[in-house]
Image: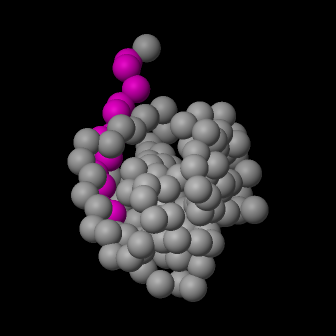
Amino acid sequence: MSDAQAELPPLDQVVPYAGLLGIRMASASAEEVRLELDWSPERCTSQGTMHGGALMSLADTAGATCAFLNLPPGAGTSTIESKTNFLRAVREGTVVAIARPVHVGRTTIVVQTDLRDSRDRPVALTTQTQAVLQAEPG
């Protein structure tokens, strides 16, 4: 467990929706966040294919976590734009999300998240922009 991860509360406490979906944190630092989501029939559309919304939720959660770890003290974040390209269907195994910051600015943070299957093949690529929400003056 990284120092940054040790400082984070459990993912399902911060993002209850992630807990509902079964997203797990593998590692987290300001430079890279890794989350995991297992294939299951409940997360599928037709023909046993993992639902795109589940994959996008995994990517969004990884990107938001990465942005959070790059915030200045007291600031918050919110997704303001997200784009996903789907590259391969997932019909088994575990999907790993690897989120890395592309730009960390004063008002926005841009994160790229790669989704990979159990055989390390690309599943999807998500680029998202997170707003940096400054704390209200006391």
Query: How far across and down, in percent of the image, does residue 42 sit?
Result: 57, 50
- State which quarter of the image contains the C terminus: top left
Looking at the image, which residue is at 73% across and 51% down?
Answer: 6
Looking at the image, which residue is at 52% across and 71% down?
Answer: 91
Question: Seen in the image, is 8 located left or right of residue 104?
Answer: right
Above-or-below relation of 110 to 17: below
Looking at the image, which residue is at 42% across and 80% down?
Answer: 122
In front of the other: 41 or 28:
41
Above-or-below relation of 136 to 94: above
Query: How far across and down, in percent of the image, does residue 112 sit?
Result: 35, 66
Query: How far across and down, in percent of the image, does residue 19 sit?
Result: 63, 41
In magenta segment, residue 81: no
Question: Seen in the image, is 125 located left or right of residue 2?
Answer: left
Q: Is residue 45 at all visible to an observer of this figure?
A: yes
Residue extent of the magenta highlight: 126-137
Looking at the image, which residue is at 40% across and 26% down?
Answer: 135
Above-or-below relation of 82 to 31: above
